[in-house]
Image (tube, helix red, strand yellow):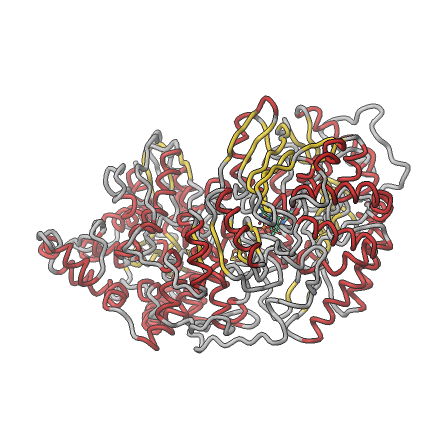
């Protein structure tokens, strides 16, 4: 379907939207004016922007001075020069996904992720690329892929994190056994030094280093002089004090420097790796690349306990794998109880209490199969494999410990293995209690041979501290993710956390490890570097820092400074929460609505682009790429408003407008956020409270009562349809009510679905039918698009179902999405009263409109409680879900050989995991279907009709239009009424696309 969505919508440039996030109400006007006049990029020092940048993915929070979005190296240099002259701290930032607190500070934040995101050059023949620091690793790799190359370090969050952040943290991922860390790939960096000087760090010979060194010279010469001094005087101490590990990112990268210099050359760009923005600001980086492996193969080894798995790691490493990952019994049990992971846990051999997942890169499938065969021949007691082991494969002189194993050579099974491995974090992070699985000792690195003793001792520390954690992640290089459960809202909890960290540091030193093998020092680990490396190296760090940054303005306090792990906690004993209103919805979790407000842990998962991450996650961020339009931004602001960090009450007009107005309530976060943050539900609560305190607009009330309006419109059709076509009528509607003039307004049918059905009656008698369906004629279907309802009736009857129409048409969804929760509750109660007796009499309730179906299935449970609402929820179905769930279409006679359909599902159905049904039924009816991995279409009920939201709605729509353009389908189908309106208004469209049930009706023989 080759199309072009044409000029892309830009919500930020739309004056009708009028958001302050581009036009700040400025707190520090002198500073802001000065910076503004010096740079091309944007300068934001307003309260909201500062709060938005007060957190990262860590347990910390520190309010920055302001935020700057540089557009060029010259901008960065101008900001740093200005700040250096006044000793104002500066903090570079990429995706802000750091876990140790290194990306929050009382500083001027330089956010590179907005404008400095270009791939500057790509030289495949040299396996080199040069890029700006704000480019996401996922985007970088997407550009390199066509040449079979990649930036090899693969931090798990590469789709959301940036190259500058990877350098800052010396990042790497599950395949570090194969590739090492970022330091191995940074060949050259253009940097801005702490005085604003722009220079380049790359490879130099020791001779050149000495020539450039001058302890009385300019800043750059003094840096070279200090590096030379360190090499000359501290080399031995560095060699003896640094642990011998594949992964150590604590402190500065001095062991790398010393090793490098031993060969006669060294590279200061690699010294920046892991420096966490404390030495220089990277403005461009040249990186070397690796070929994408031809093929992969995997094995999953099952153990009776975690220690047995740990004992096996060293022997498995003899087989030269690319990754060895571990998952313990705590996570296996949690995953077993989570619907999303049930299928992957089910595949595990019975009795599995720990697994090691081993991945190999191979030149071809046969080689991959043989490598797995060799591994399993060696490390299991004869588990059968698809290939025979080779002669002379590695054989460990150690007992077999795995009691069973599986192998994976196809994409689907490999994906299942990785899904199992990644099941841990989302489950751990969905706790809504005050106690959280906090990241503060979550990435220690230990020589793999010491893992069994280390894990046993670690477990003892946890027991001594009366808490627990799970153990998972990168066993191969000895990096385990361990997040003890602690409650930092209490004094005891903070003390408990520090005491665990202290004991773990001792343990790490005992076993020759490091306090950070992955996530860096930041606020959590800096204080432990002293104990880890000893006083002398600590002083070397500080000397180096002073040479690079004499006034310590670059991310001060971190790596070798004075940050204390117990300060600047996001939740500390002084933290207080007061929403300012009583929740109107049911919150079925520990800590109720507060638990949900505090749930976002800041990982930045909602900042992923649609192209690489897919899914339904936050479309408003994808369209606008502003922190405040991401779920994380909204969640942070809500928590800050409800805990007194913001002057505004969350129900104030200003807060509603700036923070929640653009949330389209798509529920994408509830599905794709690892913690299942449900911003749509939170927005409904706050909007409801806002209406209670400040009243509501005429437009909101009109949209909430759209059922009544539609019924009137239908009664007066076709006259009512003409009214909006009168010249000037759209302008009046835009001015008086705020309806976007660009939108096609719904028209109404004189003959409603009900009229038609009453006239026609059911065609399958109840006594001949296997099932009875009470079709709910929702507002849109009944009054505007009865043809969709008619198609549903025909298909259901063709499937042998006895059909009747429910009496009511309003599901309560419009009032709910406009925050009129009492009204929505009343409607819900009326529907429950009307429909539950029918359900008890054997009827199923079937809905054509997905958002109404989800209302019955899910949102009613937030509005009402009791057995009746559960009964309705359990017996309500979307029409395709109904056909699919009971395989009702099995007996239908379909006409074969029709076109290929592009299927765009509704976000609410995706969020409730009900979206696959339509695809299954359409395929069985003979259609080829290309289902899009699309998010919300951008209409979101009435949102897209609202004048100030039109551009955001279109910008989200553009993402969908591009996906449709890339799809192989000939016809688009979409079950959502608003999605069909968005698609109808797309310039490339041939009118409103059909509902899938219309295509099913068309396929009836
Ligand atoms: C769920 C989850 C999974 C993760 N998995 C991994 C993993 O597998 N491996 C891993 O290594 N990490 C992992 N991380 C941590 C983090 O995502 C990575 O370290 C990531 O590479 C950081 O990138 P960022 O763009 O978010 O950096 P930020 O957090 O924005 O910055 C990181 C550091 O780099 C500095 N910095 C940023 N830009 C510059 C610049 N231009 N010049 C100088 N310094 C700069 C910052 O000051 C900061 O100190 C994970 C985090 C989460 C939330
Ligand atoms: S909303 Fe979810 S995905 Fe986004 S940062 Fe918070 S926890 Fe991560
Ligand atoms: S409901 Fe949708 S738009 Fe709102 S925060 Fe969640 S994903 Fe973003």
Residue in the image at 61% along x and 63% along y: 60
Residue in front for this viewpoint, 79 or 990: 79
Can residue 842 be spotted in the picture?
no
From the image, which quarter does the C terminus lie in?
top left
Residue 554 placement (x, y as % from top left): 61, 54
Residue in the image at 49% along x and 43% along y: 74
From the image, which quarter does the N terminus lie in?
top left
Residue in the image at 16% along x and 63% along y: 712
In the displayed structure image, the side of residue 601 where residue 783 appears, left or right: left
In the displayed structure image, the side of residue 130 where residue 972 appears, left or right: left
Residue 500 placement (x, y as % from top left): 77, 65
Q: Is residue 773 above or below residue 256?
A: below
Can residue 464 be spotted in the picture?
yes
Q: Is residue 700 above or below residue 509?
A: below
Q: Residue furthest right?
A: 397
In the displayed structure image, the side of residue 402 where residue 40 appears, left or right: left
């Amino acid at each position: 379907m080759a199309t072009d969505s044409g000029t892309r919508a830009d919500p930020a440039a739309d004056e009708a939207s009028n958001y302050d996030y581009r036009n700040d109400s400025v707190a520090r006007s002198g500073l802001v004016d000065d910076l503004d006049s010096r740079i091309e990029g944007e300068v934001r020092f307003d309260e909201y922007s500062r709060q938005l940048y007060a957190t990262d993915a860590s347990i910390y929070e520190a309010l920055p001075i302001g935020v700057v979005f540089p557009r060029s190296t010259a901008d960065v240099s101008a900001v740093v020069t200005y700040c250096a002259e006044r000793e104002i701290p500066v903090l570079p930032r990429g995706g802000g996904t750091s876990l140790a607190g290194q990306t929050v500070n009382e500083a001027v934040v330089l956010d590179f992720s907005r404008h400095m995101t270009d791939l500057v050059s790509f030289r495949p023949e040299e396996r080199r690329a040069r890029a700006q620091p704000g480019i996401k690793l996922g985007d970088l790799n997407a550009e390199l892929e066509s040449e079979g190359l990649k930036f090899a370090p693969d931090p798990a969050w590469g789709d959301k994190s940036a190259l500058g952040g990877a350098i800052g943290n010396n990042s790497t991922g599950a395949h570090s056994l194969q590739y090492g860390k970022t330091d191995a790939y940074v060949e050259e960096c253009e940097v801005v030094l702490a005085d604003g000087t722009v220079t380049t760090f790359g490879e130099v010979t020791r001779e050149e280093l000495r020539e450039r060194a001058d302890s009385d010279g300019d800043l750059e010469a003094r840096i070279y002089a200090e590096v030379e001094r360190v090499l000359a005087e501290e080399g031995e101490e560095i060699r003896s004090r640094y642990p011998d590990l594949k992964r150590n990112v604590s402190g500065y990268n001095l062991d790398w420097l010393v090793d490098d210099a031993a060969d006669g050359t060294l590279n200061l760009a690699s010294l920046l790796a892991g420096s966490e923005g404390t030495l220089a600001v990277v403005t461009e980086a040249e990186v070397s690349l690796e070929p994408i492996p031809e093929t992969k193969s995997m094995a999953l080894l099952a153990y009776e306990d975690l220690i047995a798995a740990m004992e096996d790691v060293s022997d498995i490493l003899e087989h030269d794998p690319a990754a060895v990952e571990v998952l313990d019994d705590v996570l296996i049990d949690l995953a077993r109880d989570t619907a999303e992971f049930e299928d992957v846990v089910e595949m595990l051999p019975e009795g599995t209490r720990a697994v090691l997942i081993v991945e190999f890169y191979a030149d071809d499938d046969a080689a991959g199969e043989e490598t797995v065969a060799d591994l399993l021949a060696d490390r299991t007691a004869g588990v059968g494999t698809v290939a025979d082991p080779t002669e002379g494969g590695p054989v460990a002189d150690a007992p077999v410990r795995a009691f069973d194993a599986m192998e994976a050579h196809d994409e689907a099974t490999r994906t299942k293995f990785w899904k199992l491995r990644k099941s841990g974090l989302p489950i751990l992070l969905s706790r809504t209690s005050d106690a959280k699985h906090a990241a503060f000792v979550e990435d220690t690195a230990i020589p793999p041979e010491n893992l069994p003793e280390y894990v046993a001792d670690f477990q003892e520390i946890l027991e001594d501290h009366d808490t627990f954690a799970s153990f998972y992640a990168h066993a191969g290089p000895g990096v385990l993710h361990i997040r003890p459960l602690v409650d930092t809202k209490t004094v005891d909890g903070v003390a408990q956390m520090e005491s665990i960290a202290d004991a773990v540091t001792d343990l790490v030193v005992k076993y020759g490890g490091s306090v950070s093998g992955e996530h860096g020092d930041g606020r959590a680990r800096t204080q432990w570097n002293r104990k880890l490396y000893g006083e002398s190296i600590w002083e070397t760090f500080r000397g180096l820092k002073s040479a690079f940054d004499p006034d310590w303005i670059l991310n001060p306090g971190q790596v070798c400074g004075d940050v204390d792990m117990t300060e600047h906690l996001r939740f500390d004993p002084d933290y207080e929460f007061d929403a300012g209103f009583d929740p109107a919805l049911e919150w079925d979790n520990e800590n109720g609505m507060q638990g949900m407000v505090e749930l976002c842990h800041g990982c930045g998962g909602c900042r992923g682009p649609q192209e690489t991450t897919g899914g339904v996650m936050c479309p408003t961020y994808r369209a606008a790429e502003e922190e405040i339009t991401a779920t994380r931004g909204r969640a942070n602001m809500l928590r800050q408003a409800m805990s007194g960090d913001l002057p505004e009450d969350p129900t104030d007009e200003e807060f509603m407008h700036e923070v929640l107005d653009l949330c389209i309530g798509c529920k994408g976060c509830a599905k794709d956020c690892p913690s299942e943050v449900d911003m749509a539900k939170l927005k409904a609560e706050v909007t409801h409270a806002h209406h209670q305190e400040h009243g509501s607009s005429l437009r909101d009330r009109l949209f909430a009562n759209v059922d009544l309006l539609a019924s009137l419109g239908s009664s007066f059709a076709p006259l009512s349809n003409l009214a909006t076509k009168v010249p000037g009528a759209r302008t009046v509607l835009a001015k008086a009510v705020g309806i976007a003039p660009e939108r096609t307004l719904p028209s109404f049918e004189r003959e409603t679905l009900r009229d038609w059905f009453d006239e026609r009656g059911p065609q399958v008698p109840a006594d001949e039918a296997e099932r009875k369906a009470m079709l709910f004629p929702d507002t849109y279907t009944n009054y505007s698009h009865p043809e969709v309802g008619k198609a549903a009736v025909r298909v259901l009857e063709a499937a042998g179902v006895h059909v009747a129409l429910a009496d009511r048409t309003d599901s309560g969804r419009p009032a709910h999405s406009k925050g009129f929760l009492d009204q929505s509750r009343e409607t819900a109660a009326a529907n429950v009263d009307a429909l539950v007796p029918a359900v008890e009499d054997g009827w199923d309730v079937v809905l054509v409109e997905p958002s109404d179906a989800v209302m019955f299935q899910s949102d009613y449970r937030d509005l009402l409680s009791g057995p009746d609402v559960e009964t309705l929820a359990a017996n309500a179905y979307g029409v395709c879900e109904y056909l699919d769930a009971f395989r009702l279409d099995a007996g239908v006679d379909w006409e074969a050989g029709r076109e290929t359909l592009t299927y765009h599902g509704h976000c609410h159905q995706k969020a409730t995991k009900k979206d696959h049904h339509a695809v299954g039924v359409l395929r069985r009816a003979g259609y080829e279907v290309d289902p899009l991995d699309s998010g919300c279409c951008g209409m979101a009920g009435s949102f897209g009709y609202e004048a100030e939201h039109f551009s955001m709605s279109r910008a989200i729509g553009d993402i969908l239009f591009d996906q449709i353009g890339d799809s192989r389908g000939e016809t688009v189908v979409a079950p959502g009424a608003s999605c069909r309106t968005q698609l109808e208004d797309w310039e490339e469209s041939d009118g409103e696309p059909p509902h899938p049930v219309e295509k099913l009706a068309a396929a009836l023989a």
